[in-house]
Amino acid sequence: MRREKALIFELGSPGREGFSLPASDVPEREPADLIPSTFLRERAPDLPQVSEGEAVRHYVELSRRNFGVDSGFYPLGSCTMKYNPKINEDVAALPGFAQLHPYQPEELSQGMLQMLYELDQYLAELTGMDRVTVQPAAGAQGELTGLMLIRAYHEHRGDKRRTVICPDSAHGTNPASAAMSGYKVLEIPSTKQGLVDVKALEEALDEDVAALMLTNPNTLGLFEVDIPKIAELVHKVGGLLYYDGANLNAIMGHARPGDMGFDVVHLNLHKTLSTPHGGGGPGSGAVGVKKDLVPFLPVPVVEKVQDKYSLNYDLPHSIGKVQGFYGNVGVALKAYTYMLQMGAAGLKQASSDAVLNANYVRHLLKNDYWLPHDYGPCKHEFVLSAKNLKDKYGVRTLDIAKRLIDHGVHPPTVYFPLIVDEALMIEPTETESKQTLDEFIEVMKAIAKEAATNPEVVLEAPHTSVVGRLDEVKAARQLVLRRQK
Amino acid sequence: MSKIPEELRYLDTHEWVRVEGDKAYVGITDYAQDQLGDVVFVELPEEGEEFEQKDSIAVVESVKAAADIYAPISGTVLAVNEALEDNPELVNEDPYGEGWMFTLSIDNEEELEEMLTAEGYKKVLEEEA
């Protein structure tokens, strides 16, 4: 009875409707009498003709195919798919917050303003920055905002710099954001150990360099041990240090970007601070800065004078607004709730556990998969490679990812970072139990074994999903965006 | 093992150059196409555009990644391989032939001399492996 693969257009029957309206009590007019003909379509749109029940069943069926942290293990490297406590939702839904209008006067919005002010303070403390804006709606927008702040800082000093340096292991958004904000991107190589090549950096640095963008721990899950030296070199030529906070889950309460010498950070509240993530958000790419960059922050910033909170638009050097009103305040509320729930000790413990979980899985899988950067412990994530299986049995990372779907596991990040051949980037997060980790390890070992003994079952995976292996290449080369009748 | 024709010159960023008269044909190496996987789109420069050596001049997109292609020498774009628009898979199927990307004028012979030989490029690949 279930028509799992049918499009909604293929359901129902011509003329079937999900509504019935009473007879109109005003005279009917032809659309052509009211609207210029250039704006009128010639044919009625081809809409599904289904009953309300059919429409509901169709979309409920689709929704059951969703995969999220609430349905299973989701070790997507660089994304920190931790469990999102439901108390976050409760607090964000409190009528005093949820029904507040953004134009409501300040004296009637004190609770929300207090929350925004305190979140700014907490995030500044967590990262070692002086002020934080939660206006950017996502990590990538946070990066763009951070770079605009860097540009504003240099230009205010009459200093026209044109280059931003990114290591070759950087998140793809880093060079993209730098290019988007008008900078020339200079890529520098990593060492064999997977860290910034300090010598290459030194050679690349000159007075044209506006900033170095870095994640620490980096994309391989390794801590950049030379960070004090790196910061010194960048600052010596007048450049600034930008911290991509995507990997903050590794170091909360243990180390602070501000203390390492970073001048600007962006944080993904939807990663580290447990707000919902994926499916397009909404997210929050909060940006923190050291005091020299505070005058350039987006307006408004929330100020506290005595016990009153207010919105300050009087920042003459501000880069302006980067998002409607005050950002995604609902997301900010969830992050704030999480921080208060966890407390300082809890956040520190979360990072400790995230690092422990990653090292546990890494250690137990490193004989079944190739671990290219096997130096000391990793931080919150690690990068394996299926190169050993590809070379011996023709089973690639993509095949392993597809086979994981059969086991109810969301595949990890694949083919990133680019500097690792056949990369599998795994981030278990602190919210998974040892039992879940052990199950995942068993599944990964079983797939490695299958690759040797029965490669077809891996090469043809997935077998249990609604559709089998999709032809990604054909989909990309011959994109069809309209239903073909 | 990927193919590395003797007669071509290479960059360590996996571009090749073949000189025909006063034109330099440019493409990506067999190793590069293998690493990228199935190429689904190639963004080519415009004819007549001028580039300096090492400038980003084109972009190759596969299902796995998007990669910048760098100008191996300074010069003006003389022609682009329009066949790649509809058949990007030529880059995978015949990287040194039908999968060529564009031709450049040769503004500075010395830059060609400085490029890697097949032997030198082979060493680069051995180091990457």
Image (spheres, helix red, strand yellow):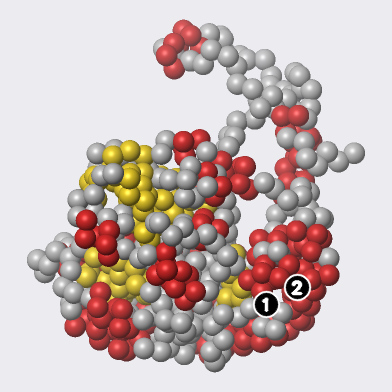
| Nearer to the camera, A100 or A157 | A157
Per the model, the C-alpha gap separating discs 1 and 2 is: 7 Å
| Chain of the residue under the numbered disc 1 shown in the image | A
Label 1 sits on residue: A369
Q: Quadrant of the N terminus of chain A?
A: top right
Kindly identify the residue that appears in the image at 46 percent across and 36 percent down.
B83
Please state the horizontal and vertical placement of residue A110, each as a whole percent of the image. 39, 66
Sequence order check: which comes first, mark 1 or mark 2?
A: 1
The secondary structure type at the circle numbered 2 is helix
Label 2 sits on residue: A448
Please state the horizontal and vertical placement of residue B108, each as a whole percent of the image. 19, 55
The secondary structure type at the circle numbered 1 is loop
Type of amino acid at the residue the image marks with label 2: Ala
**Is residue A186 rendered to the left or right of residue A70?**
left
| Nearer to the camera, B86 or A147 | B86
Kindly identify the residue that appears in the image at 47 percent across and 39 percent down.
B84
